[in-house]
Amino acid sequence: MHIETLKVFCDIIESGSFSYAASQNLVTQSAVSQQVRSLEEKYDCRLIERGRAGVKPTPAGQILYTCSKEIVRRFQELENRLREIGSVVAGSIRVGTVYSVGLHELPPYLTEFLRKFPAVNVHLEYLRSNKIYEDLVEGKIDLGVVVYPAKRSQIVTVPFRYDELVLVVPTDSALARHSKVSIAQLSGQKFVGFERDIPTRKASDRILRDHGVRPQYALEFDNIETIKRAVEIGLGIAIVPRLAVENEAHRGSLKMLEFQEGTFTRPLAIIYKRGRELSPAVRKFVEVLTAGSAAANVAQTGKNDRGDKGERPERAHDGSRPERVEKAEKLT
């Protein structure tokens, strides 16, 4: 039996999807089905049941999954140690993040990383914040890049960078005549925002509340791109990350305004499962992220930072200094 077959089986059980397992292992869906059939023939029993809720293991499949997960984990650790001896960094990295970060924060870092390590495949998955933490603990992804990182006992947090929150308004709005706006001026305005359970929505609501404004939400969405389109057609105004709207502001499809009260920032962090041995490729990816983010964070120090201090990225939970990412549990 090949280790690759066991890994494919584990991916099916964890995701509940044959197509997801195929994409994660760079094979066709028919090849995944064939590997499952070969396992069922070998053990002469059904291992998987298909239903409306997706794919689930049979009792025998659950036994195989539990044991296979440990075999695959130990094999990956073996490969990681052997790769450390060699000079080529290779393999795959699964990174979970939210749309605003994946589309507008990570691209330059990904470009730099792939230039340095072309033999590595990076799979970027767009997930809701709570799902990133769940998938990380369950081993479905290797790293997460989140905003307003939450304290979790099973998670190590490495500070990444800060981005600035700004206001965007339709170009024909009365507010569009200004370059800066007081938060008090936003009273009575209709807002387009993230859904209520999304950390950036909670933070923007807190900023408004602290300045005596109760936002009236006309629409709520789960991703930054839809929010921008809604503002462009005049359905409301929105508080969003600056990097996410710079292109639209440059094109003139949106007007971006800063706040007279100062700069409000949003902390970003890299997270991974505590106690998990990270592959050389994952460690190099974290190094590229943290090295590249240093200059960006220095640029923020001269601004009047009015971000929520209670939500800033934690030191890695072992007490290490955030500037030295390699000391955060030694990235092992």
Image (cartoon, grey):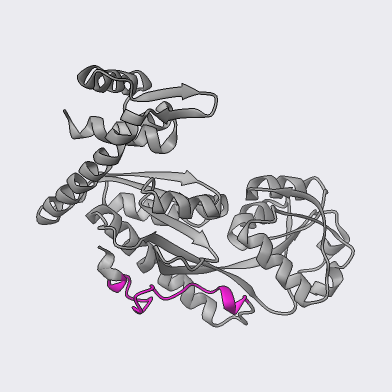
Q: Position of residue 78 (x, y in %)?
A: 14, 49
Q: Position of residue 172 (x, y in %)?
A: 85, 54
Apparent side of residue 165 relative to residue 29 in the rendered image (left or right) = right
In the image shown, does 137 or 260 lie closer to the viewer? 137
Q: Residue at x 67, y 64 (%)?
A: 202
- As drawn, 119 above or below 276: above
Q: Position of residue 268 (x, y in %)?
A: 50, 65
Residue 26 seen in render: no
The residue most toward the front is 59
Q: Residue at x 61, y 61 (%)?
A: 199
**Number of numbered discs visible in the structure rendering:** 0
- As drawn, 81 above or below 50: below
218 falls in the magenta region: no
Residue 315 seen in render: yes
326 falls in the magenta region: yes
In the image shown, does 81 or 64 lie closer to the viewer? 64
Apparent side of residue 18 relative to residue 283 in the rendered image (left or right) = right
Q: Position of residue 294 (x, y in %)?
A: 41, 72
Q: Which residues are magenta?
A: 307-328
Q: Residue at x 30, y 51 (%)?
A: 115
Q: Residue at x 39, y 62 (%)?
A: 154
In the image shown, does 9 or 108 lie closer to the viewer? 9
